[in-house]
Image (spheres, rainbow, N blue to C red):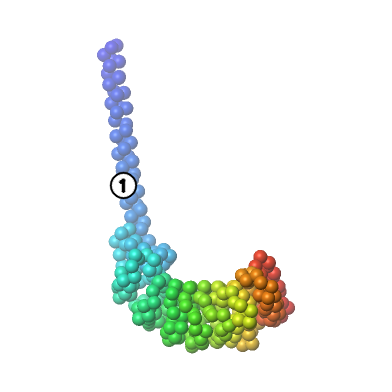
Amino acid sequence: MGALNQERSFLVSVVLTDQPWKTMMQEMKKSRTSNEFQIDRLSDLPDCLIHNILVLLDIKTAIQTCVLSKRWNNLWTSLPQLHFDSRSFNKLTPFKKFVLNVLSRCKDNGLFSLRFFQASMDRSFIHRVLRYAASHGVQEVTLQHHLNGLHIAHFLCSCKSLKTLELQACKLSESNFFEPLSKCVNLENLKIFACNVECGKTIKLSAPRLVNLTLAGTVKNCLPGQKNQVVLCAPRLSSFFYVGGYPLALSMNGCPILQRMGICLDAPSNKTQDNVEAYYSDTKNLLQEVCCYAKIIQIQLDSWEVRMQSFF
């Protein structure tokens, strides 16, 4: 009996000792199979799906995804959308070299969208990038940060394929920035955010195919008697949204009845009685003007919001 118990004890010991190794081997096999399966899944993805993933990233990050699969090595060269961001680089010089290298390697399949974020005033470099976009039939352009709006506008006039232009934090000190845009015959959407225009200036915009216009943070707080005037001539305009620190004088005689209009005004920063009275007087004049410009008008004055519907 003693020998039998010793034999059983030995077998149990072997089984218990061997079990962790079996479990470990099974886990390693499962992990290896899982990794192989994941690699296969990445390699088998269709190009169109991979493009949809990569266009959500800036181009530097998109290129870095090449390590995921050999099939991804050159897919970025045929992306229909390019997103350059200088904030991904410590210095501007390597950023410029990177941009030019990317453009030289991209295939000539056409470019649908360009997003360009640069904290520099290197005009020749910016024009080189925009020339590339225009020559490849770009339809959507987004530019941000410290770019000279007048030079951009003059150049983009040669881009006949452009349908959407968005400017963020660009310098629009010259009120005639908008005039060259009349030559962008296919421009349908114009969005301008935080691009300051000097108080008291007249903004004239004539765009034959413009459908949607947004001016947000373009006009800051002005003194009484220095409000900006916006003169629009856009026979296809459907929506107009304005967000600013001071009411403007609006002329839309060259526009149809809009489907929708939004006006959002901040409270006056200068609380003196004269400034407050002038602010609300100009606001009243603006509201009286816009009532005949759109079917649906949404107005927000500081914390007050009003929604009106016209009967046209």
Q: Residue at x 33, y 41 (%)?
A: 27
Q: Residue at x 32, y 31 (%)?
A: 19
> As displayed, is residue 24 above or below residue 303?
above
Mark 1 element type: helix
Residue 17: x percent and y percent? 29, 28
Q: How many marks?
A: 1
Residue most toward the right? 311
Residue 285: x percent and y percent? 69, 80
Q: Residue at x 38, y 61 (%)?
A: 45
Q: Quadrant of the C terminus?
A: bottom right
Give the residue pinned by disc 1. Answer: 32
Of the pair 228 and 168, the residue shown nearer to us:
228
Q: Residues within 10 Å of mark 1 (few under 14, many from 20)?
A: few
Which amino acid type is shown beneath numbered disc 1?
A: Arg
Residue 43: x percent and y percent? 33, 59
Is 220 displayed left or right of 14 in the figure?
right
Q: Quadrant of the N terminus?
A: top left
Residue 46: x percent and y percent? 38, 64
Is 192 displayed left or right of 146 in the figure?
right
Is 293 displayed left or right of 55 in the figure?
right
Q: Is residue 163 visible?
A: no
Of the pair 217 and 275, the residue shown nearer to us:
275
Q: Residue at x 43, y 83 (%)?
A: 151
Of the pair 47 and 309, the residue shown nearer to us:
309
Of the pair 23 and 227, the residue shown nearer to us:
227
Q: Which of the 4 image quarters holds residue 297?
A: bottom right
Q: Which of the 4 image quarters holds residue 115?
A: bottom left
Q: Is residue 12 visible?
A: yes
Q: Which of the 4 image quarters holds residue 225?
A: bottom right
